[in-house]
Image: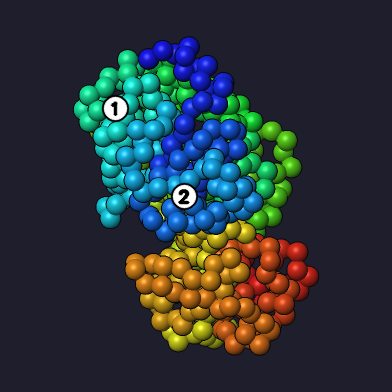
């Protein structure tokens, strides 16, 4: 590897970029790379995504429609399912899913298969970086041997390899791929320097270098485990406060007045999204390799995992207070997305809430202005296209599971028999006579 030559190519925008996986992480990254002047090739096994990108049709909320369309028209960005084009790139970012399998263990099959495809066409002087969230050791223990064995090249001598965790927060109006600080850890100081230079050439946020991929991998796990543990604490307190007839939401508002030593987290029907509900499982799984049990983390995971069931049980108790049985009751769930004002329902707790309600005999419909339908276990479920006063009056209970801002909650309150608000989105409504909060 000629580091200085590579750095010069980066500064002159002579690097060809490849991004594997054109989802919530990969497509925004590909767009930013292309906007910064790098010819960019997007790779995805889903031909539907490839077709959409090449037609300039955007399907990711954090990407500006006109940006994608213009980049494709100008020939700066195109997509393909043919991995042989890896031979044409100088920098390749792996942005594929890292879900859990049926046994709640890390499923790194997408990372493995992507690495195997890269290895077939990897040429000397290429930088490879993993962005997918994973357990510490993945880059060095899994990807490095695959790339070396499949290509015949030597890491550090013929190609650079590193890890730079994605930091994507769908729907965030302030922090996007462009301005969010980035962490980079390469195998060797030269790899770290060159990979960091690639991100600095594109991003406005700070690029922070760490000593190894393992540090960067653990850093990503820490970010989301921190949130998982604190949300677990708040969810547990929500259950206790309900028994004590205390509003936890008011408690949190009071605690927020302290200008130091406290960060507000909020309860809800469970955790959603790709990272926060899953990342602690990666860490606890890896910890067992060292004979270590992450007891605090595992406890918070158990609390958070139970929240959909707890919310269904609370709904049952609320109906009982109004002399209604859950069995055969009609319930309207407001919100399928895992967070407000986005169309992403990955790991959404609302889906599990609906499942629990149905198990208890309820007839459940849902409305989400962002999500017309969703798939779960291979079945497609369609929501109501809209809701009006007459619709709301029909249901025995309205359950709010996402705090979307484009729902008329005042109309809902005026017409609902009972409301169970798990997100405290009705807090500013004057009439609260038919509202119970989590």
User: Is 61 left or right of 158, judged from the image as shown?
Assistant: right
**Marks 1 and 2, how far apart in space?**
24 Å
Q: Position of residue 22 (x, y in %)?
A: 45, 48
Query: Which residue is found at the position 40% from the left and 45% from the top?
Result: 43
Query: Which residue is found at the position 38% from the left and 56% from the top?
Result: 47
Q: Secondary structure at mark 1?
A: helix
Query: Which residue is found at the position 68% from the left and 43% from the top?
Result: 174
Quadrant of the rendered image containing residue 203: top right
Query: Which residue is found at the position 45% from the left and 87% from the top?
Result: 328
Q: Residues within 10 Å of mark 2 (few under 14, many from 20)?
A: some
Q: Where, quadrant-wise, is the N terminus in this rendering? A: top left
Closer to the camera in the image, 159 or 396: 159
Q: Which residue is mark 1?
A: 144
Q: Secondary structure at mark 2?
A: loop
Q: Where, quadrant-wise, is the C terminus in this rendering? A: bottom right
User: Is 307 left or right of 284, judged from the image as shown?
Assistant: right
Q: Which residue is mark 2?
A: 23
Q: Position of residue 331 (x, y in %)?
A: 53, 79
Marks 1 & 2, CB-CB < 8 Å contact: no
| First of labels 1, 2 by sequence position | 2
Q: Position of residue 228 (x, y in %)?
A: 48, 45
- Residue 190: give its label: none
């Amino acid at each position: 590897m000629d580091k200085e030559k590579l750095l010069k190519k980066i500064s002159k925008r002579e690097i060809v970029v490849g991004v594997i996986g054109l989802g919530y992480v990969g497509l925004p990254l590909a767009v930013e790379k292309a906007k910064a002047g790098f010819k960019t090739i997007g790779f995805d096994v889903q031909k539907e995504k490839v077709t959409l990108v090449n037609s300039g049709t955007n399907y990711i909320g954090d990407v500006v429609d006109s940006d994608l369309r213009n980049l494709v028209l100008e020939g700066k960005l195109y997509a393909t399912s043919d991995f042989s084009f890896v031979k044409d790139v100088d920098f390749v970012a792996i942005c594929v899913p890292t879900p859990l399998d049926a046994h709640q263990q890390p499923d790194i099959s997408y990372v493995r298969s992507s690495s195997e495809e890269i290895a077939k066409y990897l040429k000397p002087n290429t930088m490879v970086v993993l962005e997918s969230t994973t357990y510490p050791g993945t880059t060095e223990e899994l990807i490095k041997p695959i790339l070396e064995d499949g290509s015949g090249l030597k890491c550090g001598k013929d190609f650079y390899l590193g890890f730079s965790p994605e930091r994507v927060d769908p729907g965030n109006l302030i922090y996007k791929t462009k301005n969010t600080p980035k962490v980079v850890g390469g195998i060797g100081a030269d790899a770290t320097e060159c990979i960091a230079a690639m991100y600095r050439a594109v991003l406005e946020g700070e690029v922070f270098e760490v000593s190894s991929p393992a540090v960067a991998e653990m850093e990503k796990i820490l970010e989301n485990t921190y949130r998982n543990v604190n949300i677990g604490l708040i969810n547990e307190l929500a259950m206790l406060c309900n028994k004590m007839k205390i509003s936890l939401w008011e408690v949190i508002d009071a605690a927020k007045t302290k200008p130091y030593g406290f960060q507000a987290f909020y309860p809800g029907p469970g955790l959603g999204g790709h990272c926060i509900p899953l990342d602690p499982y990666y860490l606890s799984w890896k910890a067992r390799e060292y004979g270590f049990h992450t007891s605090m983390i595992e406890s918070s995971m158990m609390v958070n995992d139970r929240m959909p069931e707890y919310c269904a049980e609370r709904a049952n108790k609320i109906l009982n207070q109004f002399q209604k049985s859950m069995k055969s009751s009609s319930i309207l769930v407001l919100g399928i997305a895992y967070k407000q004002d986005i169309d992403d329902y990955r790991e959404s707790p609302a889906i599990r809430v609906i499942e629990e309600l149905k198990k208890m005999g309820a007839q459940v419909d849902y409305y989400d202005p962002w999500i017309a339908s969703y798939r779960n276990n291979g079945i497609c479920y369609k929501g109501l296209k809209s809701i009006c006063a007459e619709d709301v009056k029909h249901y025995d209970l309205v359950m709010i599971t996402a705090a979307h801002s484009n729902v008329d909650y005042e109309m809902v309150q005026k017409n609902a028999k009972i409301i169970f608000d798990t997100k405290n989105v009705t807090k500013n409504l004057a009439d609260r006579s038919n509202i119970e909060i989590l």
